Image (spheres, rainbow, N blue to C red):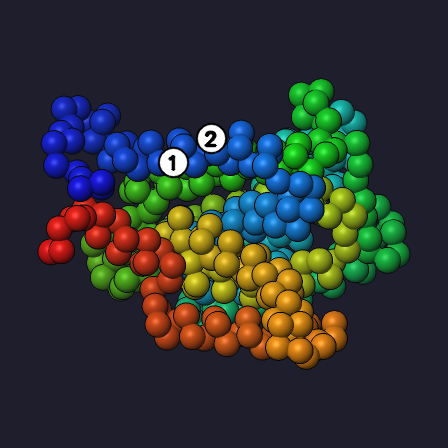
Amino acid sequence: MFYRENGQFKTSYKSDQQIFPIAQDRWAIIALVAVAAIAVPMLFDEYMFRAIFIPFLILALAAVGVNILVGYCGQISLGSGAFMAVGAYMAYNTFIRIEGMPLILALLSGGFFATLVGMFFGIPSLRVKGLYLAVATLAAQFFCDWAFLRIGWFTNNNSSGSVSVSNLQVFGLPIETPIQKYLFCLAFLVVFALLAKNLVRGSIGREWMAIRDMDVAAAVIGIRPMYAKLSAFAVSSFIIGVAGGLWGFVHLGSWEPAAFSLDRSFSLLFMVILGGMGSIMGSMFGAAFIVVLPIFLNQFLPVLGSVVGVEISTATVSHSETMIFGALIVWFLIVEPHGLAKLWSVAKQKLRLWPFPH
């Protein structure tokens, strides 16, 4: 009854094609954004912003990009960390080499260069798929790691490969405090998530899903596989590149190629799998799971040890955190293979009928 669609009639094409056609969805999203923008900055301290909220927002944005490629188009990619690195380093170069370059344009330019790299390494998808494509995109990770370490131009001739930025401003307003950084990242996530949600509902999104479900049948009905696959790589790489720029500029401030290692690619892929492939909201669920769970285990395990009278060292906490984290991922995939987005869908279905049992 809370989530009832009955009586919500559409009287125009415009109202029928809304991103959120159900009123409850619209009000819930507006309320969620309002709480995130107004209430969260007033309720939490700097540690929460630095350790949880800012990483969550940036990784959720990157997971949205990965989900477009993996979840909607069905192209397995292990080069997400490389695309984040391209976005970060190219945003850095445009920011320091072009005098007066605005921060937002620098981040978008990093996404543009990540798009070019993503389309180049997406060319093998025209001939191979599955694990073979995953290996091909893995080459992007190795190549970018080598390039940013060995080619001095990318790092402004810093031999260590480390770069740093400071004094960030947007429209004359400083981006220095954790709350300012949080709101800046939140704005990017909201805009790109809405754009991605609208994009996958259109003709291009339907082409991606047709290629994912059966590429031969999609080609038979007139869908161009080359256009669909490369466009998915382009859009996905652009969003991931912007997220990489935010990760370097806003979250880290100073970074090196190791910040965008293969582990980053795997964590983004896990976010999509756990959150739910083919779901924008699932990307955010998966990012929250990956970001919050290790911090929770790190705080919970010492408390549990003190309760049972066992002293747990820092090294033991670190190893236990990794093991429990991996075991929970496996268990969750066994219990709900379609991810957290499926649980959210089931909950909405129950709310359509509540309080009635059937």
Q: Is residue 73 above or below residue 58?
A: below
Is residue 66 something that shows in the picture? no
Q: Secondary structure at mark 1?
A: helix
| Amino acid type, callout 2 | Ala
Badge 2 crowding class, 10 Å Cα cut-off, few under 14, some 14 to 19, many 20 or more, is few
Q: Which residue is mark 2?
A: 34
Q: Determine the residue positioned at 63% across, 31% down.
A: 104
Front in this rendered view, residue 138 or 50: 50
Q: Position of residue 174 (x, y in %)?
A: 73, 26
Q: Secondary structure at mark 2?
A: helix
- Left or right: 166 in relation to 46: right
Front in this rendered view, residue 103 or 172: 172
When asked about the image quadrant of residue 13, the answer is: top left
Q: CA distance from mark 1 to mark 2?
A: 8 Å
Q: Position of residue 129 (x, y in %)?
A: 41, 69
Q: Determine the residue positioned at 24% across, 25% down.
A: 14
Q: Which residue is mark 1?
A: 29
Q: Determine the residue positioned at 21% across, 52% down.
A: 350
* Residue at the far top in the pictured view: 172
Q: Determine the residue positioned at 71% across, 58% down.
A: 259
Kindly identify which numbered label has been placed on residue 306.
none
Is residue 354 something that shows in the picture? yes
Q: Quadrant of the N terminus?
A: top left
Front in this rendered view, residue 236 or 225: 236
Q: Is residue 155 above or below residue 294?
A: above
When asked about the image quadrant of residue 69, the answer is: bottom left
Front in this rendered view, residue 46 or 344: 46
- Left or right: 45 in relation to 137: right
Badge 1 crowding class, 10 Å Cα cut-off, few under 14, some 14 to 19, many 20 or more, is few
| Amino acid type, callout 1 | Ile
Earlier sequence position, callout 1 versus callout 2: 1
